[in-house]
Image (cartoon, rainbow, N blue to C red):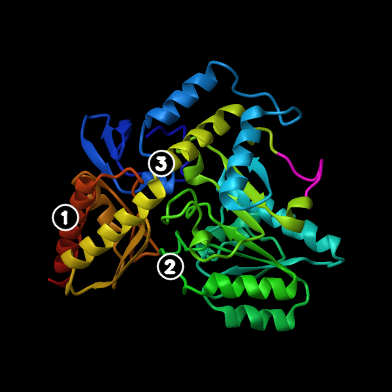
Amino acid sequence: MSSAIMNTYGRLPVTFAKGEGATLWDTEGKEYLDALSGIAVTGLGHAHPAVSAALCKQAGELVHTSNLYGIANQSRLAERLTALSGMDRVFFCNSGAEANEAAIKLARYYGHSKGITTPTIIVAEKSFHGRTLATLTATGNRKVQAGFEPLVKGFLRVPYDDIAAIKSVAEHNAEVVAVLVEPVQGEGGVHIPADDYLVQLRALCDTKGWLMMLDEVQTGVGRTGRPFAFQHTGIQPDVMALAKGLGNGVPIGACLARGAAAEVLVPGSHGSTFGGNPLACAAALAVLETLEQDDLCTRAATLGARLVQGFGAALADIHGVTQIRGKGLMLAIELDRPCAALVGQALEVGLLINVTAEKVVRLLPPLVLSDAQADQLVERLSALIRRFLSEATD
């Protein structure tokens, strides 16, 4: 790795040169099964022909103008996203952090318009919302905040999947204007809330006049088996943040809003130089079209069930495996001990995985994973986990 790059990542000793579908090849020609998708980004896999064609075509026509002018692809993408989500309007940016930052700014603007002096947002423990100063403050992980104080005021933290805790906060703070949560916590360990969590949260926000804001940066664009994770519940958020899988690797983020929340931001209140440029929107349009044409949401749900069942059978009665859980193609195998060493061990056998929250093997494979690749993933990773746990007890 070049010494000219800032030392912000603990990089693994591999550099990839080529990809196709769920397969990657490094600079030495070694083949890998990608069960991480660039952390839930390349949902259509690598070098997807529809995305590649859209990028090549758009790059030969127009890459960037400015949001001072109309952008045809941006309008088309906004219309597709609002139709798919039931939201009203979209602000385009470049990343999940920026999408959440826009949601936070929107909530504050909304609060001030109601005469609230210090608009406050309720957030959850073990959450992850980004690394800008506002989004890392909203994040429920002290490690990403350390060293960046003073943090941003205006956030109250509660346990995830705990409506009673939110109600308790409401009783003692009249300046709450919004709640920001992930439908499934990704970085926190793939925590899946109770089926009625978002339903109860929606009802509480309606009662209190709060904005219900969902961070679907990781859960969105088919990852959980529906276009957006909130659609499993039948509720509708007021604000939703998207990124990751939306561009299949091309940087793009989006903050969607509906109702009163969609009318909050006005010219001059927010903006982005690169947000929603023709190239990024061309990629996202190709992603959404492919998602629909190939019925990849249904595929994600089917594959997720196959993987959970497969790991359940392969790791049954293995001491040290505490839980296997998943929502579509967001999967977790939780162990009873730290297991970061598994990432390097998996790399050695040609498998890309992730460990988060110290003890959770997180899997985010592409939606185009084949049945054979899914079975290979189960076989290869289960063998590694069994060996890891047996060696740890010897």
Does the magenta run of residues contain 269?
A: yes
**Which numbered disc flags the more N-terminal residue, 2 or 3?**
3
- For the residue marked with disc 2, what is the amino acid? His
The type of residue carrying mark 3 is Thr
Asked if 307 appears above or below 14 in the picture, the reply is below
State left or right for residue 312 relative to residue 224.
left
The residue at the far right in this view is 115
Residue 260 vs residue 26, the one in the foreground: 260
Which disc is residue 379 wearing?
1
Query: Which residue is the site of mark 3?
Result: 42
Which amino acid does the dot numbered 1 rest on?
Answer: Glu
Residue 227 seen in render: yes
Q: Would you say residue 364 is visible in this rendering?
A: no
Q: Which residue is mark 2?
A: 191
Picture coordinates of residue 364 (x, y %)?
Answer: 36, 52
The part of the chain drawn in magenta is 264-271
The residue that appears at 27% across and 33% down in the rendered structure is 26
Where is 167 relative to 227, above or below? below
Q: Residue at x 18, y 66 (%)?
A: 313
The local crowd at label 1, few if under 14, some if 14 to 19, many if 20 or more residues have their Cα within 10 Å, is some
Q: Is residue 133 left or right of residue 126?
A: right
Within 10 Å of disc 2 (Cα), the crowding (few <14, some 14-19, many 20+) is many
